[in-house]
Amino acid sequence: MAVNYSFSFTSPAKPVQKLIEYSYNEFLIDLPVHWKPVPSTESNTITFQSGIEDASIIISADFYDIPPSKAQAVAERCVESRLSVHEQQFPARVEVIQRSIHAHSGGVGLELSYAAAVPGDHMFVYLGYVTPRKILNFTLVCGPDRSKASTLFNATIQHFRPKLP
């Protein structure tokens, strides 16, 4: 019995998605044109919304002098306070799926993350940084589908370039 198969050495062409670069003092982000900046009443905060994705991205920076000896405590407090806001919005419904705090691979501080779900309602996917001079936050808020949230987060975060420290 002979098995016959073939494959192509070239990958199929993917449609090129037009990205818009948003450049700020503390980060750069490239987003598809359907993500629109939305004015915020909070200083040091920018929000982007996409009707196509039915999602929002909220990026903020808070500036502090954070001594290395206090960074871990600040990071833990940051994650706890952010999760408590979700809990206030959706009492007794928030499920924390994942959370972590670890040293940033570039050695410039700590990297924080969590994923939290409000079943049937929302997903919150967060990435943050605690450095000697600031806390930088990136939060994706989207629908309840965990797989879609993960895919959307991975697609957007690869175009997020924080300026650290």
Image (spheres, grey):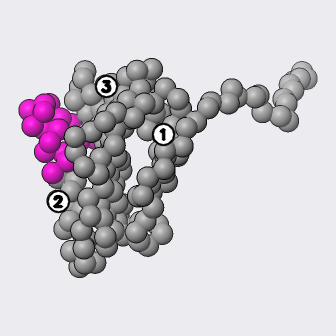
Residue range highlighted in magenta: 81-99
3 and 1 marks in contact (CB < 8 Å): no
Real-space CA distance between mark 2 and mark 3, rounded to the nearest whole angstrom: 26 Å
Q: Is residue 69 above or below residue 126?
A: below
Q: Which residue type carries mark 2?
A: Arg
Indicate the position of residue 85 as horizontal and vertical percent values. 14, 42
- The earlier-in-sequence mark between 2 and 3 is 2
Residue at x 54%, y 43% (from the top left corner): 21
Query: Cα distance, mark 3 to mark 1?
Result: 17 Å
Tag 1: amino acid: Thr
Tell me if I can see residue 86 in this picture: yes
Residue 140: % across, % down:
35, 38
Q: Which residue is mark 3?
A: 144
Q: Is residue 63 above or below residue 85?
A: below
Residue at (85% x, 30% y) in the render: 8
Which percent across, then down, holds residue 116? 26, 39
Q: Name the N-terminal-most of marks 3 and 1.
A: 3
Pick the front one: 34 or 90: 34
Amino acid residing under circle 3: Pro
Residue 156's disc is: 1
Kind of element beneath mark 1: helix
Residue 77 has which mark? 2
Marks 1/2: CA–CA distance: 26 Å
Measuring from the top left, give residue 117's x and y in whole percent: 26, 33
Q: Is residue 99 visible?
A: no
Report which quarter residue 18 is drawn in: top right
Q: Residues within 10 Å of mark 3 (few under 14, many from 20)?
A: some
In the image: residue 160, left or right of residue 94: right
